[in-house]
Amino acid sequence: MDSQNDTQISEFLLVGLSKEPELQPLIFTLFLSMYLITVFGNLLIILATISDPHLHTPMYFFLSNLSFVDICFISTTIPKMLWNIQKQSKGITYAGCISQIYFLLLFAGLDDFLLVAMAYDRYVAICHPLQYTVIMNPWLCGLLVLLCWMLSALNSLLQSLMMLRLSFCRVLEIPHFFCELNQVIRRACCDTFLNDVVMYSSAGMLGGGPFVGILYSYSKIVSSIRGISSTQGKYKAFSTCTSHLSVVALFYCTVLAVYLSPAATHSSQSNVTASVMYTLVTPMLNPFIYSLRNKDIKGALKRFIGMAAIKGST
């Protein structure tokens, strides 16, 4: 077998969601609609938090960053998929595949770390309410977001550089609609032990670590809420966490469904479906989760849309 490196062959083939030609227009329309809804919904959250002074708080600062990351996250994979369907092509260049892996890991890591920062914000707000404004000052919030970017960028850079050492024997089909890290590694024609060690070690530290942090924060929150005497006070305290808990559950359940499934099923249709959940459905649902159950966000959106309508009429 020819051991020519794929940096010279320079192309992978993305199989996509279905090989049936008659389903491609339906998939294109569905995913384009979901992509536009995701971008528009998250953009509205960002504009609402920027335009409304009442939302200039740590909680909504992290939320606006999460919305920005979700826009970038979904834009890493879906436009290329839509382009391939439109052009009736499956190709993606080697450089494009490595770039897609880098940015996918970057924004997925940012999602993970920002959820931890938001959990810490809720912990301080409920467990130390009198010190909240002192602890969660603008300097600390900015530092937490910067730390999220640095850790995620280092991880994605390491994983991408590790990909460059692999050689591929021919133009390869990837049974996915984007360059998923594990799928690409599995198709190398050289020893991938070091890549596997780095990939699973990073997943354990950067995935398991934030998850443990979130669990610890909420264990303290639950203990603090149990100490509140009035039922109304307990409900009010817990209601500030429901949106964040919903997003955390949605994010981790879909990711775990993909990356903790047995290796034998990594190319199955169920794996691709789970990937659709965390790359598209989760970013699309986040704005609805945070806006439908949040009076502050709903009020800010109404004021922003009203101001936009007034400016448009004048």
Image: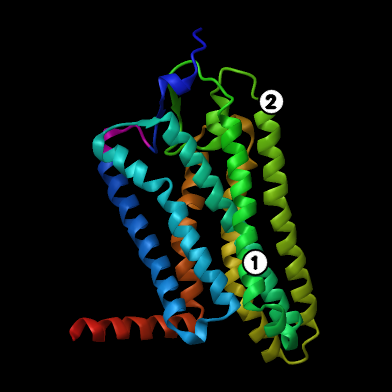
Image quarter for residue 39?
bottom left
Q: Amino acid at mark 2?
A: Phe
Which residue is tagged 2? 193
Instruction: State whether residue 23 appears in this view.
Output: no
Secondary element type, mark 1: helix
Q: Residue at x 65, y 59 (%)?
A: 147
Q: Is residue 32 above or below residue 86?
A: below
Query: Which image quarter holds the C terminus?
Result: bottom left
Q: In this orientation, which residue lies closer to the viewer: 102 or 29?
A: 102
* 22 drawn magenta: yes
Q: Amino acid at mark 1?
A: Leu
Residue 36 lies, in percent from the top left, at 33, 59
Q: Is residue 133 above or below residue 74?
A: below
- In screen coordinates, is 299 left or right of 79? right
Residue 266 lies, in percent from the top left, at 56, 34
Tell me, yes or no, whether the two marked residues, 1 and 2, touch with CB atoms within 8 Å: no
Give the Cα distance between marks 1 and 2. Answer: 36 Å
* 257 drawn magenta: no
Q: Residue at x 37, y 86 (%)?
A: 303
- Name the outermost residue toward the top: 1
Q: Is residue 28 above or below residue 179?
A: below
Q: Is residue 30 above or below residue 88?
A: below
Which residue is tagged 1? 143
Q: Residues within 10 Å of mark 1 (few under 14, many from 20)?
A: few
- In screen coordinates, is 235 left or right of 77? right
Image quarter for residue 196?
top right
Secondary element type, mark 2: helix
| Start-end of magenta stretch | 18-23
